């Protein structure tokens, strides 16, 4: 049995003349947590809907769990769980009614439904709330219920489209514990998120922009492969960070400049010359530097760099 559970080759989706997904190719290994990242409108939800057999591809091929998404759509659907971006729960049903509804869709027997219902209620921490209207639940509970309903039939592959949007940090962390647990049990999880701290939990990641793949690898590979030029972090004692940003970003030696909280991140060609140039630029304007050091880029640094490089107005397309 192949170790790959999702294989995507040149997958393309056009809406009229607009290409939302553009010859996308990638593979996902069995049991891994796979991060599917990209800015708003990059084509993530469209790709997921094609992989779930809910939207027809314009061209290209893909298989999910060994089944072709175009010719074996029913088998694909039986083998996946899908949590859509807008949690697909019925607000006017109770918790229990929602679970029963999904149990019906998946064709679970009464006995299995009872077992799975107990499992979902326990997993989602919803015991005692079976009769609550779904619309009265907080974001975190709704999210866990939506996950429970999506995996009621214990599919080996699950697609989670922005599962943590609008959910508080504690619920997000609990949710990731659940995802880890599922992955530990051998379930393959493909997840989209705009939180880059969450992307760090993924085994592999792809980044797409305007429907095209622009980077792939583990979090560590992304940080070390794509940004080989030094990244310097500046902490100021006196002087405003926004003012410092404006000063540095117009300099020819600053390849990329961005603010990270109260610090400035500057990508330069060469470490020592870059440090000297930063000191001159800032101290020349009366600012005092508390710390200036080379750092390992965060995923956020890498993605900002890659996305800006890939956007024609700012840097021109990436050669490929
Ligand atoms: N049915 C449709 N008809 C026309 N255009 C569409 C349709 N569905 C999506 N699009 C367009 O395709 C592009 C990709 O949309 P998609 O929803 O896949 O992005 P996304 O990466 O999921 O974004 P987000 O992070 O905001 O959820 C967008 O420009 C969107 O407007
Ligand atoms: Mg989306």
Image (spheres, grey):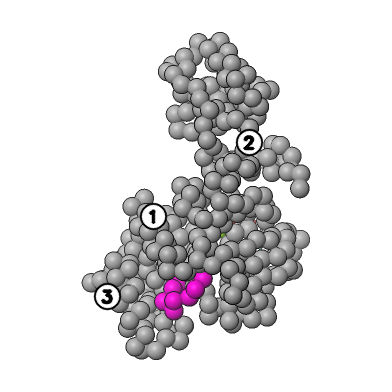
Q: Secondary structure at mark 2?
A: loop
Q: Which residue is nearer to you in this view: 168 or 18? A: 168
Q: Is residue 175 visible to the viewer in this orientation of the structure?
A: no
Q: Nearer the viewer, mark 1 or mark 3?
A: 1
Q: Residues within 10 Å of mark 3 (few under 14, many from 20)?
A: few
Q: Earlier in the sequence, mark 2 or mark 3?
A: 3
Task: Determine which of the numbered discs, if any, sits on residue 131 in the image.
Answer: 3
- Report the predominant secondary structure element of the magenta stretch: loop
Q: Is residue 288 visible to the viewer in this orientation of the structure?
A: yes
Q: Nearer the viewer, mark 2 or mark 3?
A: 2
Q: Residue at x 74, y 68 (%)?
A: 59
Looking at the picture, how far across and down is residue 246, in whole percent?
A: 58, 23
Task: Determine which of the numbered discs, if any, sits on residue 172 in the image.
Answer: 1
Write down which quadrant ligand 2 falls in. bottom right
Q: Residue at x 36, y 83 (%)?
A: 113
Which residue in the structure is indicated by mark 2?
228
- The quadrant in which the N terminus is found is bottom right
Q: Secondary structure at mark 1?
A: helix
Q: Residues within 10 Å of mark 1 (few under 14, many from 20)?
A: some
* Mark 2 in CB contact with mark 1 (< 8 angstroms): no
The quarter of the picture where residue 107 lies is bottom left
Q: Residue at x 33, y 78 (%)?
A: 117
The quarter of the picture where residue 272 lies is top right
Looking at the picture, how far across and down is residue 241, in whole percent?
A: 49, 24
**Magenta segment, which residues?**
150-157
């Amino acid at each position: 049995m192949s170790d790959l559970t999702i294989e995507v080759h040149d997958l393309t989706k056009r809406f009229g003349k607009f290409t939302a997904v553009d010859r996308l190719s990638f593979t996902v290994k069995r049991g891994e947590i796979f991060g599917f990242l990209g800015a708003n409108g990059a084509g993530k939800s469209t790709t997921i809907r094609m992989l779930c057999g809910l939207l027809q591809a314009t061209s290209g091929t893909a298989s999910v769990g060994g089944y072709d998404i175009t010719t074996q759509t029913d088998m694909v659907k039986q083998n996946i769980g899908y949590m859509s971006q807008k949690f697909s729960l019925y607000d006017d049903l109770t918790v229990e009614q929602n679970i029963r509804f999904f149990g019906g869709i998946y064709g679970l027997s009464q006995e299995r439904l009872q077992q799975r219902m107990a499992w979902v209620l326990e997993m989602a921490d919803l015991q005692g709330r079976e009769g609550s209207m779904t619309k009265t639940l907080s974001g975190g509970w709704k999210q866990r219920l939506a996950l429970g309903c999506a995996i009621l039939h214990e599919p080996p592959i699950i697609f989670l489209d922005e599962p943590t949007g609008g959910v508080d940090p504690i619920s997000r962390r609990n949710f990731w514990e659940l995802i880890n647990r599922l992955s530990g049990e051998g379930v393959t999880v493909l997840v989209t998120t705009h939180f880059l701290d969450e992307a760090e939990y993924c085994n592999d990641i792809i980044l797409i922009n305007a429907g095209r793949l622009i980077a792939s690898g583990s979090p560590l590979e992304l940080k070390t492969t794509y940004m080989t030029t030094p990244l310097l972090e500046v902490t100021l004692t006196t002087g405003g960070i926004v003012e410092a940003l404006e000063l540095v970003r117009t300099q020819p030696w600053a390849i990329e400049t961005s603010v990270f909280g109260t610090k400035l991140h500057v990508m330069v060609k060469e470490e020592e010359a870059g440090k000297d140039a930063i000191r001159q630029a800032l101290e020349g304007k009366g600012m005092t530097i508390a710390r200036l050091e080379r750092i390992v880029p965060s995923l956020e640094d890498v993605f900002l760099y890659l996305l800006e490089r890939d956007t024609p107005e700012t840097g021109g397309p990436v050669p490929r």
